[in-house]
């Protein structure tokens, strides 16, 4: 059978970019999109403690005596908007909504699945009090929804999970509870560590403000208010309000000054827990990936900032390695369209295999496929980091040079960065936040960087703490620089012992703050995240260092330090600062997706 | 600010500067009394911060009553003013000049309203009857326990808008008010031209409320409330907007309750009058400070409330800044506030009542001038006609057979559209040959047909520098077509559409749509052009995207502006001799008295 005919059976006009001609066997066995959809709204469902959730069920409208697998889509964004009538809209367009993330619900049902979307407790029409995202309560409620779905009379007892971002981040922590009927999971945008999702490297970013904003909570109590005694809670709030970076902001100090603290409750929890600890561990998979016992398909977008670029790679390389797993990185975040449809064929191929027992051929492919940015081509890989990586130190040099050659002279003055507090003399223009930059000479040939990236910075600050923002940028000969990936570190989270580190390892401790001695030179290891990018011939590679980045094209921003800070970045032969880039020297011809 | 002298205030003339030596001097140290309780009539306790001279004396009191509460104002004291659009600008900082006034012998009381921060009770939305009554109690308490018998009010934004509402209730001790920003008709602020606006959702997320219930939930049976919610959910622009829809599809509807109330009251009614100045009677001396907001109903309200005040009420008006010049905290009006309150609360001869009653910033010229009335005496209302070939001309078309310009609206849910790429028809005037001041109300008249039964019209007025091409937005106006009928309240040059009911449009029929735009005072400089833009939706009216302290994602897809029409529609804008579409600009050619 020709590939074209196979695609017709699946109901696709075009082969998705991430499918390879060589691995199309089995496509023809997938369930075609033949069912009409029946929707049942506000079906009551009781979780273990008797609280009733309102659930929407979408299922094949058929008289056949057939049983279908179930797909659970769980988030607090509200069930009612997930199938609103709209095209798949691009990020940043008018009326785009980042919370319509459950995915292509109608398409799954047409292909023979039941899709179940609840309002979590305290959200929309469900009873109970909301506890924010990913907590133990949400994990257990989701577990109960999975088991409830499995016993629906028209369900075959095999359950998977769908949806991107929020819907995906929840999947590993629920899978780790091992609900008996959950047979496989598949994520787009998944996070290994929720602390770093909100405090990358310990630096607060404002991303999560919108969660309470976007979740229609009608009754909510924070985890902190449930966990601590009144005295403890008041003491924690008082300490947090002592942080000058926080108390300079009307918004953040306002949320922390509510009593009882019932404004933006999840964001309140995030503000309150500014070091890594139990609050974050409960919501993160990083400490217990071995509890996941079901096959997992991990998909990431390339984010310029934040944890989505890390989660899939962490889960791919950790946990019970006997569990089947796949990984893909198919697009940049700015290309995101919602409702999310580009991965639907892959979802069907995955779940037809694991939930319907159809050999769709999905497990015959190599386990990793990456979009290589810059050349925009897909490639197969087998391991992470790539075994053929040439770890290459690009040194920060005086005169703004970024070079693979280390400085030979020891008497070179450090490079100075002066951070100006936005609260003095009328703030900074968003495009003109003070920074220092280091650029390679114009590249004579393409350089591919694929893998995890770590910055080693020899630096002294004139205060007891400071934020670092490190941006890896692609500078074309003409036009705007493009930020590829960004990393952060809070200086007081640096590790204190000297360690022998692998090129992708860090020496930080985010559980406490140890003040820096002003003027003391420290080595800071800063996680600049994973990426795959070809810097083209004629371009330059740039490293930019600043306190925070407020460029308007970014949709989240690091909270700046509220005082002026002088950074001395050392670039001499003894105290050398460098970024360690995973340079890929070659790829075999048959790795490229055809 | 505390250090700032009263020299070189840009809106003061020489006489005002001379008299400024009479003003209170910064001689007091500041003491804060945090979280003092104030008991409301129903035993609910509000908490306030009292900023006062560090002694046991009694002083005049200035009350600041903002829905953003006292924490935001405390944060405002830690920063130099940050301009709108710059990083860490924050809308919630509404009360500026706290230290300035205390050092000069005033007590400043900053309140957490009901259900906000640590105050007890339930918040029922901005400018509620409840807040108005509470604010009267705060004034009475401050007057009785703290003051020398004299109380005034300070603040901008909502802390300004509540002042005329409260003052019209005549609370004891209140001797004068000086609101920066006022609102005459809150309905038109939330529904410009009858189209649901997007400003209230970010407002709800930014107010530090701990306990809120909508008035709709308080006032209606469950049955009626559900009926109202279901009715609102069917409204096409809400049914296609996930941000709004999900709030209505919750029960009880407790997510962003103020926005719920706004959505449940789509027509002008008594419900809106409760939060509007309307026909209230205000006799307390009033100094209104306005900004030239190109959007919403705040700029026009400054003039309208001023004009409505009784002849015997001492009153003044200053239009002080373009909206983009606003800062957080907003300290520019503070020296004038001192002049006002030194006169009315301390009896100091500050000379403030000797000046002409109006001071207007002339944008473009960037200077202030005195005026005695608004609209100004001798205003010439000049119609500029939309003409074929993207022209804006003083002469209407003479031919009766000129094809209309057409524009097609594709709803954003059918085609991804970036805010800056929304289609528009543009009409540009010839360059001005002499500096020309436009000061007053602006009216648009469009002869338009649409191919469905209702649609949205948006018109924007720009000042364009013909050399650089740089444009400054001056004014916007909107109309939901089915609200086209002019009401009895309309006056010459001040059209008012009917917002109590809707009349469906006959597809294909040409209607005359007349509606008011935001008022301006702008000097079109020689070499500049007036430019009109017609759009079917407008998502860039106001720089909410530049609330840079919030994640931008939060505004990236959520538009800021009137909700876009949810259906596809084709518009024909006519400009032939029988259907000459126009915009009316108020030209003032009279001799001007500049503030020097």
Image (cartoon, rainbow, N blue to C red):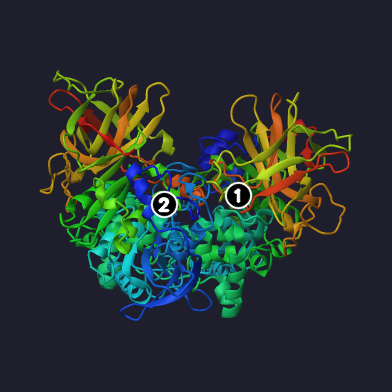
Image location (x, y in percent) of residue A218: 42, 68
**Residue positioned 20% across, 23% down in the render:** B394
Going from N to C along the chain, the mark reached first, 1 or 2, is 2
Image location (x, y in percent) of residue B19: 35, 50
Residue receiving disc 1? A421
- Residue A191 visible? The answer is no
Disc ID at residue A46 = none
Q: Secondary structure at mark 1?
A: loop
Q: Residues within 10 Å of mark 2 (few under 14, many from 20)?
A: some
- B205 vs B229, left or right, is right
Frontmost of labels 1 and 2 is: 1
- A185 or B149: nearer the viewer: B149
Q: Dividing the image into 4 quarters, which one contains the C terminus of chain B?
A: top left
Q: On the same chain: label 1 and label 2? A: yes
- A452 or A412: nearer the viewer: A412
Residue receiving disc 2? A36
- A51 vs A275, left or right, is left
**Residue positioned 42% across, 38% down in the render:** B419
- A529 or B113: nearer the viewer: B113
Q: CA distance from mark 1 to mark 2?
A: 59 Å
Subunit of label 2: A
Image location (x, y in percent) of residue B573: 23, 29
- B343 vs A229, left or right, is left
Q: Quadrant of residue B264?
A: bottom left
- A423 or B449: nearer the viewer: A423
**Residue positioned 20% across, 25% down in the render:** B575
Furthest-top residue in this view:
B399
Q: Are marks 1 and 2 in contact (CB under 8 Å)?
A: no
Subunit of label 1: A
């Amino acid at each position: 059978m020709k590939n074209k005919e196979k695609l017709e059976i699946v109901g696709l006009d075009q082969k998705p970019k991430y499918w390879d001609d060589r691995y199309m066997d089995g496509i023809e066995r997938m369930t075609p999109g033949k069912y009409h959809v029946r929707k049942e709204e506000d079906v009551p469902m009781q979780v273990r403690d008797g609280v009733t959730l309102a659930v929407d069920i979408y299922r094949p409208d058929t008289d056949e005596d057939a049983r279908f697998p179930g797909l659970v889509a769980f988030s607090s964004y509200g069930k009612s908007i997930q199938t609103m009538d709209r095209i798949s809209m691009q990020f940043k367009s008018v009326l785009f909504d980042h919370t319509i993330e459950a995915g292509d619900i109608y398409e799954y049902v047409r292909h023979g699945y039941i899709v179940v979307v609840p309002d979590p407790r305290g959200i929309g029409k469900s009873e109970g009090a909301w506890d924010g995202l990913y907590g133990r309560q949400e994990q257990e409620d989701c577990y109960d929804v999975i088991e409830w779905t499995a016993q629906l009379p028209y369900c075959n007892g095999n359950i998977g999970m769908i949806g991107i971002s929020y819907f995906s981040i929840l999947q590993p922590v629920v899978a780790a509870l091992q609900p008996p009927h959950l047979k496989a999971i598949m994520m787009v945008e998944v996070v290994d560590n929720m602390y770093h999702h909100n405090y990358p490297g310990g630096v607060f970013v404002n991303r999560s403000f919108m969660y309470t904003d976007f979740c229609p909570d009608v009754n909510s109590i924070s985890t902190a208010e449930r966990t601590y005694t009144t005295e403890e809670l008041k003491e924690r709030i008082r300490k947090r309000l002592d942080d000058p970076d926080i108390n300079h902001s009307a918004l953040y100090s306002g949320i922390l000054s509510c009593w009882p603290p019932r404004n933006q409750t999840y964001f309140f929890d995030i503000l309150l827990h500014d070091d890594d600890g139990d609050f974050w561990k409960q919501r993160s998979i990083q400490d217990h990936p071995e509890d996941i016992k079901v096959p997992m398909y991990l998909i990431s977008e390339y984010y310029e900032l934040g944890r989505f670029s890390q989660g899939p790679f962490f889960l791919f390389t950790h946990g019970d390695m006997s569990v089947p797993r796949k990984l893909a990185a198919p697009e940049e975040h700015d290309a995101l369209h919602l409702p999310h449809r580009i991965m639907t064929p892959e979802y069907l191929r995955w779940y037809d295999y694991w939930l319907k027992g159809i050999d769709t051929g999905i497990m015959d492919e190599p386990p990793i496929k990456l979009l290589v940015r810059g050349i925009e081509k897909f490639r197969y890989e087998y391991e992470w980091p790539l075994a053929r990586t040439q770890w290459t130190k690009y040194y920060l040099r005086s005169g703004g040079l970024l070079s693979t050659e280390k400085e030979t002279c020891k008497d070179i003055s450090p490079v100075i960065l002066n951070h100006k507090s936005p609260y003095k003399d009328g703030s900074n223009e968003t495009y003109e936040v003070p920074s220092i930059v280091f650029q390679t000479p114009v590249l004579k040939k393409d350089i591919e960087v694929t893998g995890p990236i770590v910055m080693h910075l020899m630096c002294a600050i004139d205060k007891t703490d400071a934020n670092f923002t490190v941006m890896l940028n692609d500078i074309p000969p003409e036009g705007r620089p493009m930020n590829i990936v960004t990393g952060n570190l809070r200086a007081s989270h640096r590790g204190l012992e000297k360690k022998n580190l692998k090129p992708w390892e860090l020496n930080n401790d985010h559980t406490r703050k140890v003040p820096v001695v002003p003027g003391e030179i420290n080595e800071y290891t800063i996680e600049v995240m994973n990426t795959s990018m070809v810097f083209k011939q004629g371009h330059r590679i740039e490293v930019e260092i600043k306190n925070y980045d407020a460029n308007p094209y970014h949709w989240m921003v690091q909270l700046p330090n509220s005082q002026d800070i002088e950074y001395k970045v050392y670039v001499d032969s003894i105290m050398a600062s460098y970024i360690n880039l995973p340079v890929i020297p070659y790829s075999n011809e048959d790795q490229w997706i055809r | 600010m505390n250090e700032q002298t009263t020299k070189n205030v840009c809106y003061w003339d020489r006489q005002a500067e001379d008299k400024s030596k009479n003003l209170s001097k910064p001689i007091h140290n500041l003491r804060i009394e945090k979280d003092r309780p104030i008991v409301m009539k129903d035993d609910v306790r509000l908490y306030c911060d009292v900023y006062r001279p560090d002694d046991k004396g009694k002083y005049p009191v200035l009350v600041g009553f903002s829905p953003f509460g006292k924490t935001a104002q405390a944060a405002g004291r830690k920063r130099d003013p940050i301009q709108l659009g710059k990083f860490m600008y924050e809308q919630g900082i509404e009360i500026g000049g706290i230290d300035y006034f205390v050092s000069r012998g005033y007590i400043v009381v900053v309140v957490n309203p009901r259900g906000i921060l640590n105050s007890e009770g339930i918040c029922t939305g901005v400018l509620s009857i409840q807040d108005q009554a509470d604010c009267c109690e705060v004034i009475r308490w401050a007057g009785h326990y703290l003051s020398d018998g004299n109380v005034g009010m300070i603040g901008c934004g909502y802390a300004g808008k509540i002042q005329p509402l409260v003052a019209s209730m005549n609370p004891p001790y209140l001797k004068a008010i000086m609101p920066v920003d006022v609102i005459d008709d809150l309905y038109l602020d939330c529904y410009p031209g009858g189209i649901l606006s997007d400003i209230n959702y970010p407002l709800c997320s930014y107010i530090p409320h701990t306990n809120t219930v909508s008035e709709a939930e308080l006032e209606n049976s469950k049955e009626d409330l559900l009926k109202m919610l279901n009715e609102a959910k069917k409204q096409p622009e809400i049914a296609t907007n996930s941000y709004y829809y999900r709030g209505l599809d919750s029960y009880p509807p407790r997510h962003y309750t103020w926005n719920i109330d706004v959505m449940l009251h789509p027509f002008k009614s008594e419900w809106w009058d409760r939060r509007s100045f309307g026909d209230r009677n205000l006799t307390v001396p009033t100094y209104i400070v306005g900004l030239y907001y190109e959007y919403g109903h705040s700029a026009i309200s400054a003039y309208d409330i001023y004009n409505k005040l009784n002849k015997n009420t001492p009153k003044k008006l200053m239009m002080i800044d373009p909206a983009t010049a606003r800062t957080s905290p907003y300290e520019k009006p503070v020296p004038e506030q001192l002049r006002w309150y030194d006169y009315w609360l301390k009896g100091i001869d500050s000379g403030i009542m000797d000046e002409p009653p109006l001071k207007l910033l002339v944008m473009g010229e960037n200077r202030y001038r005195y005026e005695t009335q608004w609209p100004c005496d001798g205003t010439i209302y000049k119609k500029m006609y939309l003409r074929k070939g993207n022209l804006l001309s003083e002469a209407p078309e003479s031919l009766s057979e000129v094809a209309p310009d057409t524009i097609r609206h594709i709803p954003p849910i059918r085609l991804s559209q970036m805010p800056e790429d929304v289609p528009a028809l543009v009409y540009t005037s010839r360059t001005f040959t002499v500096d020309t001041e436009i000061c007053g109300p602006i009216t648009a008249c469009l002869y338009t047909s649409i191919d469905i039964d209702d649609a949205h019209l948006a018109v924007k007025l720009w000042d364009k520098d013909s050399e650089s091409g740089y444009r400054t937005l001056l004014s916007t106006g909107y109309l939901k077509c089915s609200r086209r009928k002019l009401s009895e309240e309309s006056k010459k040059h001040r059209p008012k559409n009917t917002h109590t009911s809707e009349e469906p449009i006959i597809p294909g029929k040409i209607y005359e749509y007349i509606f008011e735009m935001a008022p301006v005072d702008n000097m079109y400089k020689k070499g500049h052009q007036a430019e009109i833009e017609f759009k079917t939706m407008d998502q860039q009216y106001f720089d909410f995207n530049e609330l840079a302290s919030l994640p931008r994602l939060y505004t990236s897809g959520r538009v800021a502006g009137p909700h876009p029409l949810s259906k596809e529609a084709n518009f024909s804008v006519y400009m032939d001799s029988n259907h000459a579409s126009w915009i009316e600009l108020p030209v003032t050619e009279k001799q001007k008295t500049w503030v020097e």
